[in-house]
């Protein structure tokens, strides 16, 4: 079968291999979403008289068949077909003849790929949102469970002040909740229907773009047809930037866990089923998954940079460079989701060792507390600070749990206020439910059932 | 005057120079904001009995004096003082003796710098928001003014389809409006009060954190004290990531303008007052400002990456690495603002040359229109496409303006729907007015007047 | 078959999927190289008495069989086996029983993977070197062929001064020759034998590391066993950084070709067999391959950054993070090679249109020449510059070819000195021949024949 | 005083501020180098008859005066002058009238800035080379001094196998020696004379480019005049990439020191004069300099990326974007040098605590040794590995120093072979001496004495 643009010459083989690249493989992930968008497009073409009712019905049947095949992993794309759009059009032409040749009326592969990526990303973002709220809930439960367990607070990695496992766990829950705001903004910016933009400049046909947007459940139509194409890579990088912030937070959590499960600390223990061994050292149980989360926080940055560097300073309208954004985008979303799920598991399985945590409460950890006792006796803080600093040997011992309780200001160990995060989390969970049921209903109406257009690969 | 932590030893000179770095110079930008935060902190210390009313009044007087000096560029920071926090505390001690030594009660430089950066960033974001809405308005006006001027639409930089200057200008307006959503999210995440977190683990004093947040006009208290410190660099990078998306959009606008003001196109003319010359070639008038916008879109990426790479995988609590995030953050915000202002000016002064634009309407530009005419006669699109593609020599000429009008689907040249963007812009303008008047009122109440805590440097 | 470190517990499934990642797929590329290294290791184990002659012979036979299978694409790695090292050891154990269990004596997968990557990279670098010299020769031939063809020289993308196609083509040849110096340095740093380092700290066995290095044709033994593991990711990023410089050069060449083959210039024509079409616009012939070279220059940067960000600030010794460097390394080398080959083809097929080039010789292009004529009459340059700049209308016309010939200083249009680049190129070609025949001889001795351990994937 | 290109219009103020940027401040660092290049250019102009002997003598006198002023920090550049080239030409015109107006004959600011940066970078690279060899020598001495001190070897940050402080220190010395190869390649690529390229296309004057190259001590003339300008940013990024590899190595060294000076390990102690305190916690002594080295390894990456992202895909010839590469280049070289010097100091002052190091020799550290004992008894390695792994409780204790000595293979603890690194270091030290004395002689001949054209700023 031919390329869509095939006329009267053949492409050089090296150029074909180079320009197709991994597209025909990556596009396997997009077949379902592309067919859904084609179905909505065909429906609209029928309402404006370009397709007959019979043609539309025939196309619908075949598109649903492709979705079904793709869902079962049975739809394939040959390199010579370049991408999923070509493979699907060729399939329709083979099945339906002239009717298949009409599906591309009033559109371009450019707006097709954008539409497919948005539907795919929408499903991904819903799944990511759900995974994040689960991780946050896990951390929140840990914060409550361990709210009174002392933990040496550190700055510069050195022992600093008394803290608690609860404060530590809650800090990540709150940070991830704020990171979710970025995910939410990315979700909204992704939730715009691009179809009808054709190759960046529309077409002289009375396309009903609003109808297509509605059929696909987009909350908004992306208005300007040139902007549609100019946003390629931008929406993708906005999503990856948002994901990167989440994984950046996880890199700190992973680093803390790696450090504090070293035998010299022993604050935490990871169960062995989460640890890999060594091919040469019989005794090793290594926190490999955590190390990879740490590493993959850098990967997210590389993926975001990749996309943004590719689209930077490109002139208006479609440029082939855009194709190079697809792989880092797909890698990025799969990587981020995997990191969140692995961290949920790690927190769920984590063992906290109170005795080892208490070993860190050496006298110096109370130096600030001692200085503030002098302050309460009327000594100006800076003088109290010096006094204590010059006589650290005189520091007495305190009861860690008493000290933790005495920090009663909002957000401190004696007053964690975890219900704030809990309330925020409930809002996020509800938002997810609302988004998800809207999408669910959309697909049930359009396709008869919902297919998982995003399937995690890891 | 001494460092705040000075006790009984001197720092090695090389280490001092290395660790202080540019901090003492960069902090000149933060003196006002740091004093405002100190004032709110002092006010609170008075309400909880740590400062007397008289002490608070004395501190207020001196802090206002420092703000005034800083506003006039008369407050200086020596390298030996390390940063603005030290310089200000030293000044207060010098002026007020023991009272000055009390200002640091219940806080750390860690939460001070975060607070100062947030106030500074808040002022910046307001100014940036205002500059962006101005640029968007300028583009929107251009879109309306030139909505009927034909412009060759390009893909792959090659002539593709008929388009208009209006469609082109509006595409940027809409894109920048979406970019503003990211700015808005960044504004909200920045708008959390960090004070009361001390060195990451709070203090055993009944600090009234809510009061401080309210006095400084923050819309929210950042709850968990460890999260406060862990968010250092994150909020900064979220802001820079948002700015980068705006400047990424501008890189495309700049590239278009550079390309299309080349004499071979001549679509646009930049007035010479925006163009620099060459030291050797007498005839040159170069679009230097646009080239620098193009370049600086890369700079924004470097600044964001810089910040994120520094904080990646740092363990919980303050780490000195954070200091290295200040310079790229400050460079980033100034760079982004400058780019927006330069682009506003460029669009305002741009001359559009209709005759040159029309020269791009070669017959091939109408190939898709011709194919769609066959479609209207019943030919399946893929056949029509091939038919036209194999007989390009037969393409007839069209009237560009007619063709543009015929594209009536939403967001196309014949139906730009610029009122959508206009409505959205009005919402953004109103949001800015609301944010800004809240900040204005806050400072009038706290300081008696509003000082410009962010001053653009370029 | 089991993991090498399997003892008495099973890994959590999610953790297994996450930690293995794409390794089992990527490692398909390394099977040959890993076997070659194992063979050298086994040979050495025999010389120090750990393997008997019979055991070594059996291992050799089976390792050669694996290499042969892998070369034919018939050796597979299951995810449960994690990597090629495990798959190969399991194969040997299955074939040879206890003898297979001895192959891992005195080594770790850590030094195995480093060794395999170095052999793989060595073969890649040779191929890349050869492709680069071919591209340089192509450019050099073009420079000679078109040395007298006028071409408007541009700065700021605006017409600046008379230039020639020869000067333009030669500029890339010289730049690529300098880029090759970086490739050469990378080759030398990669050419160190890591084996014998085990898991970073060696083993208490009298391993003959020098022998292994010699058998594998490395020009040097990497001495310190901890340095061996600490260099993971460093050598890879040094290679990718070097490749990036080459592709950065190509991004300029691609951009020039894309620009100057726009119909408004028409300086160059790309034959249609190098151009793809559009799915909607029948007339389009797009320079897709060149656009992708432009895009992929950004990819190279992302790959290099990825690797360096992963290894940054890791403590000494092996860390699992290293695994995350393998994919960007492999993607980077394949991408860079593809870009070079596509550019060679593009230059070979390029058509140069002298008439269109001459159209750029508008009077203003001679402004500097006119100023220098005044200089020759004794007018100080700065005065001459102003004089001409204020009276551009008076500029007379020149003969472009005469002007080009008049620039006789070294490296100018009238004196290209291409023989310098030619001599340099011959040296590089000879260096390649020497490197390559050394590697060829090594493998013939070790394996009986040379297998292509690096096979380009694109 | 006017801009060099000033004719009959004034630049818009915002555009001026934006386009000049920090250039007029950064260029303060380049005044000396720019004058030296001008002097060589003037000398050459005299030999080809464009300047008289008297004019040359006058120019030489004034250029030497400017160098002298700049060396004392007394030469200033106004923003309105844009850059050092303008400030210096204006100065010469003011002092010498028409003679001053002749200095720019046959050159452009484009090739001037490239020449100035190369001379500046050459001086920097010499200083960096010297600092690196000092650091390597320090590490080498430490390796010898502590070669028998046991240190727990770690992988995955967990205790792995017996190692020594000597092995650890030597690993960094060897790594930095390899990093120096990249510095050396960068030095050679930077060591090409660009002058005579003018604005990218040369001039029709019989400039003697070889003479200028020789006068400035460059080892090579950069031949093609377009390549000269196209290499802007490339050479800079090659230098920063090389520096980044060195600082990447230091990030590991810093991380090790930070980790192992935590009280829970106590392997190393940093003297307090290298440690900063906290403003709130009286007891803190923080390894701030090391944390900043860790952070600044990320900065180097950002600087390199910044430069490469700016120049990517720019068309041939000078583009104003190049200007944006100057700041990251200058920041990068100063940052890298500071990191090396701080690490030299840290290693020199480091205290090694043998007793704490020995605490890490828990029984499990010997698991591999135990397995290899079974191997010596004839058990196949994989069986021995499992046997030990399933019975870790039976592990007996060993004498750490005995075990270290037993690892006798090359590069192991019992056979460090530090003399290899020592020999390599001597070669590098000699190379530096040769490079440096050549530069010294060049400047003595050209300027009468050597001025420090690169002055470290930190």
Image: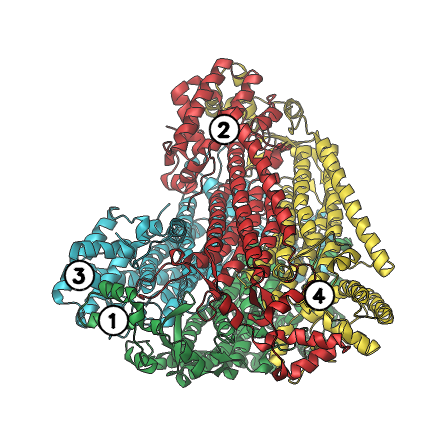
Chain colours: A green, B cyan, C yellow, D red
Residue D200: % across, % down: 58, 33
Which chain hosts label 3? B
Cα distance between the residues tagged 2 and 3 = 57 Å
**Above or below — where is B169 with respect to A376?**
above
Q: As drawn, is D425 to the left or to the right of B134?
A: right
Q: Which residue is mark 3?
A: B98
Which class describes the residues within 10 Å of circle 3: few (<14), some (14-19), or many (20+)? Answer: some
Residue at coordinates 16% horizontally, 57% vertically from top-left? B96
Residues at marks 2 and 3 on the same chain: no
Q: Which residue is mark 4?
A: C112
Q: As drawn, is C446 to the left or to the right of C302?
A: right
Cα distance between the residues tagged 4 and 2 = 53 Å
Q: Which mark is residue B281?
A: none
**Above or below — where is C33 with respect to A437?**
above
Q: Dot 2 lies on which element? A: helix
Cα distance between the residues tagged 4 and 3 = 66 Å
Q: Depth check: A434 or B311 in front?
A: B311
Residue D129: % across, % down: 55, 43
Cα distance between the residues tagged 2 and 1 = 61 Å
Q: Which mark is residue D36?
A: 2
Which chain hosts label 1? A
């Amino acid at each position: 079968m031919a390329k869509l643009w095939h006329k009267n010459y053949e492409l050089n083989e090296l150029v074909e291999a180079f320009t197709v690249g991994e597209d025909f493989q990556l596009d396997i992930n997009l077949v379902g979403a592309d067919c859904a968008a084609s179905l909505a497009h065909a429906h609209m073409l029928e309402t404006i008289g370009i397709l007959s009712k019979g043609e539309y019905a025939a196309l619908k049947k075949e598109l649903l068949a492709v979705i079904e095949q793709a869902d079962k992993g049975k739809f394939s794309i040959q390199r010579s077909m370049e991408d999923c759009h070509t493979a699907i059009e060729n399939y329709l032409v083979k099945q339906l003849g002239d009717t298949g040749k009409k599906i591309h009326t009033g559109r371009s592969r450019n707006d097709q790929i954008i539409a497919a990526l948005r539907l795919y990303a929408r499903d991904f973002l819903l799944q990511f949102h759900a995974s994040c709220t689960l991780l946050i809930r896990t951390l929140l439960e840990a914060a409550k469970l361990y709210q009174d367990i002392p933990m040496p607070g550190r700055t510069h990695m050195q022992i600093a002040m008394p803290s608690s496992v609860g404060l530590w766990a809650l800090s990540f829950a709150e940070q991830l909740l704020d990171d979710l705001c970025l995910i939410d903004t990315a979700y909204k910016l992704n939730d715009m229907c691009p179809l009808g933009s054709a190759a960046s400049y529309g077409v002289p046909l009375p396309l009903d773009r609003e109808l297509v947007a509605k059929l696909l459940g987009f909350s908004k139509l992306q208005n300007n047809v040139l902007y549609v194409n100019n946003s390629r890579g931008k929406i993708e990088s906005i999503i990856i930037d948002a994901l990167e912030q989440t994984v950046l937070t996880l890199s700190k959590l992973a680093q803390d866990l790696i450090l504090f499960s070293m035998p010299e600390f022993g604050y935490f223990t990871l169960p062995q089923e989460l640890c890999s061994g060594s091919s040469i050292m019989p005794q090793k149980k290594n926190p490999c998954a955590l190390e990879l989360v740490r590493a993959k926080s850098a990967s997210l940055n590389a993926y975001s940079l990749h996309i943004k560097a590719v689209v930077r300073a490109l002139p208006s309208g479609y440029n082939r460079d855009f194709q190079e954004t697809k792989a880092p985008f797909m890698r990025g979303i799969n990587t981020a989701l995997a990191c969140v799920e692995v961290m949920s598991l790690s927190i769920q399985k984590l063992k906290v060792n109170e005795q080892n945590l208490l070993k860190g409460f050496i006298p110096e950890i109370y130096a600030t507390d001692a200085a503030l006792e002098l302050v309460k006796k009327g000594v100006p803080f800076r003088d109290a600070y010096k006094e204590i600093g010059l006589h650290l040997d005189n520091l007495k011992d305190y009861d860690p749990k008493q000290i933790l309780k005495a920090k009663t200001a909002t957000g401190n160990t004696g007053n964690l206020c975890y219900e704030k995060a809990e309330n925020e989390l409930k809002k996020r969970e509800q938002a997810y439910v609302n988004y998800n049921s809207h999408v669910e209903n959309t697909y049930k109406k359009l396709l008869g059932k919902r297919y998982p257009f995003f399937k995690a690969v890891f």
